[in-house]
Image (cartoon, rainbow, N blue to C red):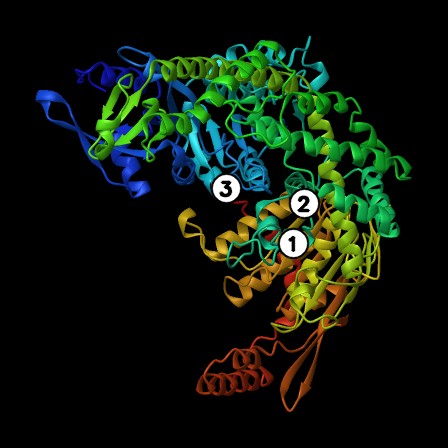
Amino acid sequence: MNDQFSTPMMKQYQDIKKRYPDCLLFFRLGDFYEMFLEDAKKASSVLDITLTSRSRGKDGRIPMCGVPYHAVDSYLAKLVRNGFKIAICEQLEDPSKVKGLVKRDVVRVITPGTILDEHILDKNKNNYVCSIEVKGVFLAIACADISTGDFFVSQWETASPFESLKNELARLNPSEVLLHKENYENSELLKTIREACDGSIFPFSDWELFVNRAQEHLINHFKVGSLLGFGLEGKEYAVRAASVLLGYLKYTQKDKVYQIRELKLLGGHEFMSLDKATIVNLELSSTIRDREKRGTLLEVIDGSLTSMGGRKLRELMFKPLLNKKHIIDRHACVEELVKKAYLRAKLKDLLSQVGDVERIIARVSALLCGPADLIFLKASLVKILEVKELLKDCKSNLFKHLQKEIDANLATLIEKIESTLLEEPPFDSKSGGFVKSGVNVKLDTLRTKIKGSKEFIASLEAKEKARSGINSLKVRFNKVFGYYIEVSKTNAEHVPSDYLRKQTLVNGERFITEELKKHEEIILSAQEQMEEIEYTIFKSLCGGILEKCLVIKKASSAVALLDCLLSFAKLAISFDYVRPSIQNKGSITIINGRHPMVERLLPTGDFVPNTVTLDLHTNQMLILTGPNMSGKSVFVRQIALICLLNQMGSFVPASKASLCIVDKIFVRSGASDVISSGLSTFMVEMVETANILNNATKNSLVIMDEVGRGTSTYDGISIAWAVCEYLLENDWGKTPKTLFATHYHELQKLEELLPRKVKNFQVAVKEIDGSPVFIHRVVRGGASHSYGIAVASLAGVPKEVTSRALHILNELEAVKAQGSFVDFSKELDTLNVKLKELKKKIVVVK
């Protein structure tokens, strides 16, 4: 920016803007935030507000636009959603008390990942910002939600860091990603991030500054002797990523990050792995078609009563447990809640009165809160202590642990807030009127002093009316002119001689008397002192709350998990979910399993349940055939969803379930073109297939739905056959339990070749008058018809088309019967040998 401004204020603007070149600068001028030059052009376009101009003197005019400060939240929300950073520049002095230029500076930087405003944030979703370190085979991701105080980091050593990055970002779905400037220029890395999430991507100019003193930075912030307690010893890239992210948070919040009190190291051994394709295909948090929450697993299971519980439930869904004991502990809590109606009812009553404690603490940290927030915090903490008392009689180990996580010493903080603040205070912390009597002696003295003057002024109007004989006389106050006596023009001649003229109006005059002036000075001086004293008390109270930040965080985390467990219990009771048993045999047995989302879309009792057994010995792979619309996809997905629900700690939709721990779930389904990535349907299909073949283990669950459909028939069958073989028999011991749904009936021959591992199943169909009737029941054996033309007819395809298709089908089958058409099933034995060679040549697309 050139030194082009001649006025002191615009030079001030220019100096501040130079320090925040990548932000829109919201420059406070009176009751407005103003923007100038390019910032004004960008903001006016996005916000759809008028672009005006301001005089630059002899050099003409400069573009400008503005928004009122009291309505800024909605404008900030729109800009953040469009990927902008905003630097909020405030007046640091009272303009009425300053001669000349008012001191201004940036008090915080708002970015997509550092929002604290509750009106902008999604209350049931974490708002993550991530920093990423990629160096060779090492990948580290640090992640924080400044609105809740969550801060964690992970590090991997992997041959496919970009694939691991994509899967982790798909799970986290951050709204902002930070990169080193060199990585920001890496087109492959940027493409990977954009494919994984919708977050804004920014370079961070101070990256090296925080990397160079990473350990020291973290140790100083968390006030520890070393990083050993965090498990970060030897995790160089995790330490670097965490230091950079913490530095960025301090930069945006002007060091007000007191709520960041814990750093957790997360590893791949703790949670089930879910890649992006699986998250999308299982419709965990958004539907494939509409990208909406409605119709997803999250919508079906979310009965949370608190915002904290809503966020925690999403976390549990994307991070299913691998630890058998921890899963069983959650199941035990759900069972206890199911059996104890009183416990459920009481817990529901208490949790429904708990506010978003985590986000209140974040606003306290940034001093963006008001007295009303602290009263709400106090009321929530009271209910949380009642929850602690309620859990005393619970039997489950996890309930006992959560009861201990809620510190009884919170009562001291509750008492402090209660003894300091009025029960129904104003929101603004700088206007006073919220501190109780008895808290501060000077404050009480000023209140007594001001009370006498206010009583005098309250009685002054009646007194002056009687003295002057002017019945329309009024005593008023405004912030500009202070106290005054107002008289109409028609009564001006009756004004007493001791009245001093203060202001002339069109229809009247305003006066003041020496006595009124004296009391005005008393009131205004005392009022100013009182406001300063109350604000000091407020800041001190906030400081005391932040000292208990970690204790409050532990209690709120306990409440969040309790809320999730209560959700699971309500789900079990309302929709007949059962507690699964967990065994170490490596098998999955589900009796009368149901799809949690599809059954809710149908009238009660209409969903057809199905039974399945998968193991590593006799039922490693189920080849599932049947026509479209018969329910193949529903069946294979419900098994994956039941396994996922189990490892979240929930009961499952079945009449009985015996499940092993699944380390990874892969769901590969019919893909659509990803035009923005330059990938066709078939390429997407092969990329996802390659990912499964390279990463599945014997403890994984693989769902393959219509593999090989994006190319010619023989190519497709060959690939599908080779993929099946690879999943059944490979050199690396990667033989996962697999459900293979297909229209390639030729694959049914695999049961003859490998009868101990493969079993054929089909979705039964009744044929009435030549038309299929889908009964959605999975039975033993393979299907012989796909009923594609019948399904096309049901879909509304014109009769002329379906009739012609039936004619062509009959001709082709007649040719095949005469021997002119290749009977692929007879060639499979010969091709089997060749296909074993083909599988070794599958190119892994990265």
Whether residue 298 is situated above or below residue 831 in the rendered picture: above
Question: In front of the other: label 3 or label 1?
Answer: 1
Give me the residue at 67% from left, 25% from top.
264
Q: Earlier in the sequence, mark 2 or mark 3?
A: 3
Return the residue at label 3. 197
Q: Are marks 3 and 1 in contact (CB under 8 Å)?
A: no
Q: What's the distance in space between the residues labelled 2 and 3, CA to CA?
A: 17 Å
Percent x, y of residue 110: 44, 29
Give the farthest residue toward the left.
Answer: 58
- Which secondary structure lies at badge 2? helix
Whether residue 8 is situated above or below residue 271 in the rendered picture: above
Asked whether 559 or 497 is in front, the reply is 497
Percent x, y of residue 214: 56, 13
Give me the residue at 45% from left, 55% from top.
680
Q: Is residue 553 left or right of residue 285?
A: right
Can I make out residue 575 in this image?
yes
- Which secondary structure lies at badge 3? loop
Instruction: Check disc 2 and give the amino acid type.
Output: Met
Q: Residues within 10 Å of mark 2 (few under 14, many from 20)?
A: many
Q: Earlier in the sequence, mark 1 or mark 2?
A: 1
Instruction: Check disc 3 and give the amino acid type.
Output: Cys
Question: In front of the other: label 2 or label 3?
Answer: 2
Return the residue at label 1. 297
Percent x, y of residue 191: 44, 39
Give me the residue at 91% from left, 38% from top.
393
Query: In the rendered image, which quarter contains the N terminus?
Result: top left
Give the farthest residue toward the bottom.
Answer: 769
Return the residue at label 2. 317
Q: Earlier in the sequence, mark 3 or mark 1?
A: 3
Percent x, y of residue 466: 38, 28
Q: What's the distance in space between the residues labelled 1 and 2, CA to CA?
A: 9 Å
- Which secondary structure lies at badge 1? helix
